[in-house]
Image (cartoon, rainbow, N blue to C red):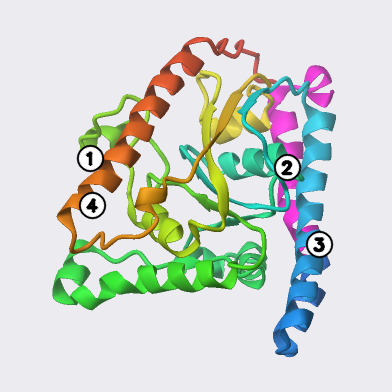
Amino acid sequence: MLSVLLPPSLVAIIAFIALITTPVIGFLALMPFALLKFLVPLRGWRLACGELAVAGASLWLILNRMIYRLLYPVAWEVELQGELDPGKSYLLICNHQSWIDILLLGDVFHRRTPFPRFFLKRELLWVPVIGLGCWALEMPFMRRHSKEALKANPALRDEDLQTTRKFCERYRDVPVTVVNFVEGTRFSEAKRIARGSPYRHLLRPKAAGTRIALDAMGEQFAGILNVTIAYRPTNHPLVWSFLAGEQNQLALHAEVLPVPQDLMAGDYDNDAEFRARFQNWLNALWQRKDARLERMINRRPAAAAKPRTT
């Protein structure tokens, strides 16, 4: 592994260059089929082209996997409770700390579940290559309105709801892993304090995406894949520590939970009793996740300090 032979800063540079190259390769592989899918409005044709586009996008995951194993002595602790079937759909919920989370989920669940689709901020649509690639794979882009804008125009609240419903309807007959970072943003200690989170390692969960996904696709999901990621404590920013090889012993726990049948349909906005039940269910999951994170973090060995050689 190169991280054993080279200084961390050089490993980080090599990894960064490699990991910004693989999306370009995946993009070039998927785009011909994505364009063909949009050009011919026949359902059978669109499904076939969609599968070929996903196969092209999967090249990105395969190349990333090769990079990790070439650069690092990967010894990730992955624990999976329950059975997964790549021919069935799942709702994946996960704590969120960095864009590195996406790389890990793609690596660990490749060929174990269908290709993942993420709920994305609309601003990412304009990121070169990545934005267009996610659009071609028909991932949902969500608008984030300020409290002031919502107060001035309450109808804006329905935009993300309609986007999510359209996305879920599109995948009613196609296996898909719907990924929802329930906190809505990346965790930081500053955000936790500012938002008054009752959890030690998590922000408060937001119910909207999970609620709509269960409402639109609950009967299609084979289960809810509850994922918890714990990184090794380091003195460096998380992205740098991953690229430099300090996260070779991170931990990922996943459990397949049954879909709560009593929460698949209900009037969340107008039924106070249903809303309370849904929030209690999600908060209970988050309490368990926070406790699990505490245990996982405490048993992660701290990354040994290495001299910065340039």
Q: Secondary structure at mark 4?
A: helix
* Residue with the mark numbered 2: 112
Callouts 2 and 1 close, C-beta under 8 Å: no
The residue carrying pointer 1 sits among few (fewer than 14), some (14 to 19) or many (20 or more) residues within 10 Å by Cα, namely: few
User: Which of the two discs, 3 and 4, labels the residue nearer the N terminus?
Assistant: 3
Instruction: Please give left or right for residue 48 compared with residue 292 in the image.
Output: right
Residue 170 location (% of width, % of height): 57, 72
Callouts 2 and 4 close, C-beta under 8 Å: no
Is residue 11 in the magenta section?
yes
The span from disc 3 to disc 4 (Cα, nearest Å) is 40 Å
Q: Secondary structure at mark 2?
A: loop
User: Which of the two discs, 2 and 3, labels the residue nearer the N terminus?
Assistant: 3
Q: Please state which amino acid type lies under the numbered disc 4.
A: Arg
* Residue with the mark numbered 4: 275
Q: Nearer the viewer, mark 2 or mark 1?
A: 2
* Residue with the mark numbered 1: 195
The span from disc 2 to disc 4 (Cα, nearest Å) is 33 Å
In which quadrant will I find the N terminus? top right
Q: Nearer the viewer, mark 3 or mark 4?
A: 4
* Residue with the mark numbered 3: 56
Q: Give the camera-side residue of 227 and 222.
A: 222
Which residues are the magenta region? 1-27
Residue 7 location (% of width, % of height): 74, 22
Instruction: Please give left or right for residue 299 compared with residue 278 in the image.
Output: right
Is residue 297 in the magenta section?
no
